[in-house]
Image: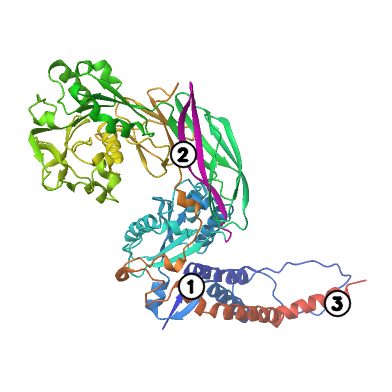
Amino acid sequence: MGLGFLVPAFLVGLAALAVPVILHLRHRDTERPQKFPSLMFLELLPIRTSERRRVTDWPLLLLRALALSLLVLAFARPVFSRSAAVERAARSRAVVVMVDRSMSMGLQGVWAAALDSARGVMSHLYANDRVALVLFDDQAEVAQQFTRDHAGALAVLARSAPGPRGTHFAAALRAARQLINRAGDAKSEVVLISDMQRAGVGGIAGLDLPAGLSFRSIDVGSRDRANTAVLSAEVHRAADGQRRELTVKARVIARQLKEPRRVHVRLTLNGRLSGEQDVTVPTTGDVPVSFAPVLLPAGQVRGSISLDHDRLVADDSFHFAFTADDAARIAIVVPDDAIGETVFFEHALAVSRAPIMRVERVRVGALDARMLEKTALVLFWDTAPPAGAGGAALDAWVAHGGGVVVAAGRRLSAGARSSPLLAASATGNVDRLADRGGSIGDVRLDHPLFSVFRDAPAALSAARFLQYPHLDAAPGTDVLARFDDGLPAVVERRNGSGHIMVVSLPLDSRNGDFPVQPAYLPFLQRLVLYASGRDATRLWRLTGTDWLLPSGVREPAVLTPDGSIMRPARDTAGAAVALREAGVYALYDGRVQGEPLALLAVNAPPNESDLAQVDSRELLLGVRPSAAATEATSDAPTREEVESRQRMWRVLLVVVAVLLVLESFVANRGWRGTANRLAGANSDRGAP
């Protein structure tokens, strides 16, 4: 057993023991002359009231020194325990405070509760304890490295606020793990302050945390989780005679309402109110909201759908942006004897709305640089690309991002003239009529061309092909799909930043049933979008993602929703902008003025509107058991346990109170008490 102190700094107060000694040695009685007619009736007493050089009242001095010593010991908080345990208990802590700043924390009253909880955690830290601050949403940021300046860490937290991003607990725990690994031999503790949104628990399974780590969570979420939000938007263009109209539809969702709610929904286009609707949302569920058609604005269009605010304001508005005329021009080079073969192909592209695909038949001689500048894709229907001057212009256009698709058929395989732009050569035809047609066997589902079939790969293998060209892929090309006999079906070659595709799948109904299969339409649309370098037009994207800017912009400048200007640097992969805010981003080239080159709307993840919570006891269930965090696994008691088990300081304070009473009694005894009584008696005699 040994004696330890929880607050040993107070032992410095023992230096105050010198104060009673100094008072005893330096004390002087003040002489107060009294006027008397005669001193003959006064008794002479040998009381020394002049300067003294030695202690004359040892009991009083010892009482005062003892009282002061016990008072200092009481404030130092003594505790009897094993010396090693006391040493480990008094060891400083390294505390990581993780504060959730996702969109759901913006619910009325939740962020204020989070700040109060953080202040409460730091107010219980001792002077030697170090604290680090991690702010997280879908990513984690170490806002404050380990420091003993607890007030400074709180100041950093006070400058933060909830944002429009999702929740990801795993990112915060990884950041805390990195901090703990650099904390040395200090006792580690992690405190999570969050509304414990269930949507953020993904990715925790398999997470590795240090053994013995003390972890606790503080739930600041509201018990009232009712919420209404705008979930999505749809845009449809239509022509009414000479007018081009726009129809906008939205979905409004409600969760855990106590009763159905009547909301007023507003549509704003380019800053002007363009529609209003009153709808009643159920207690839980979603309702569609359709606005009356309006005249389609010209150029870039930015829009928003908003409803009456509730306790979570951030999801009461939804942003979208698009170009009024975003049509992709597709030029088709068709031989004179193949006019009727492209019917299915052209109809499949005509139904596209994101973007609109405008098919135009052209002759090989019309493929000059001026025409190609306005074209997104050139498709050669069973004919080879041109050579000579036309081929040079086409090759330069492809190198700068253009796309070429060659639909190979019987004409190419019969010896049509070849071109250096071809990614494969056709050497005859394969007849599969005897085995009732071939099918697609091997497909690279990881390629963007087949991304729509990742969840339904059987849709491609359902088509049957009676005859197709025998392709030989050229060196330096990629075979993206093969028939069941191993022959290439789709071949790709990159030329600069452009794509050259050769497709031997019969795209008409003469040599197979592919045009009547469900996979025909999505395959052709993905083929055109991928080969032309254009993905499907998206009305919005989610926060936490990146915007890869078009390669043709020389000096990109991006105007963010908060009004600031970003000039992203360009590297080998191009220029990209991190989408951290909700709203509309505008892209310019050089100066930020005039009509933007492109608009991009950004919204918070829809699952942030779902305020359902996860039990804090379930949060770490996915952590690997071999390294799971525990509340306290050390043999040494925690500082709080040591403090709760010792009561000696209260006893010392009681003893000090008793000594002070005894000191008052002793101070009025002995020669000093006699002098005081005689002085009082003489004063009474001299009174008139």
Q: How far across and down, in percent of the image, does residue 479 sit?
A: 15, 41
Front residue of 597/446: it is 446
Q: Which residue is mark 3?
A: 40
Establish if 627 lies above or below 496.
below
C-alpha separation, residue under disc 2 versus residue under disc 1? 57 Å
Distance Cα–Cα, label 1 vs label 3: 72 Å
Measuring from the top left, give residue 562's x and y in whole percent: 49, 35
Q: Is residue 339 above or below residue 258?
A: above
Front of the two marks 3 and 2: 2
- Which quarter of the rendering shows the C terminus? bottom right
Nearest the camera: 295 or 80? 295
**Helix, strand or loop under label 3:** loop
Quick one: which residue is furthest to the right in this view? 688
Q: Magenta residues, as a range?
A: 223-252
Q: Which mark is residue 640?
A: 1
Measured as percent of width and height from the top left, residue 16 is found at: 55, 68
Instruction: First in sequence, mark 3 or 2: give its number.
Output: 3
Earlier-in-chain disc, 2 versus 1: 2
Amino acid under label 2? Glu
Nearest-to-viewer mark from 2 and 1: 2
- Badge 1 amino acid: Glu
Sequence-first disc among 1 and 3: 3
Between the C-alphas of marks 3 and 2, the distance is 118 Å
The residue sitting at 45% across, 62% down in the picture is 191
> How many marks are shown on the rendered structure?
3
Circle 1 sits in a helix, a strand or a loop, which is it? Answer: helix
User: Dot 2 corresponds to which residue?
Assistant: 234
Question: Depth check: 639 or 408 in front?
Answer: 408
Q: Amino acid at mark 3?
A: Met
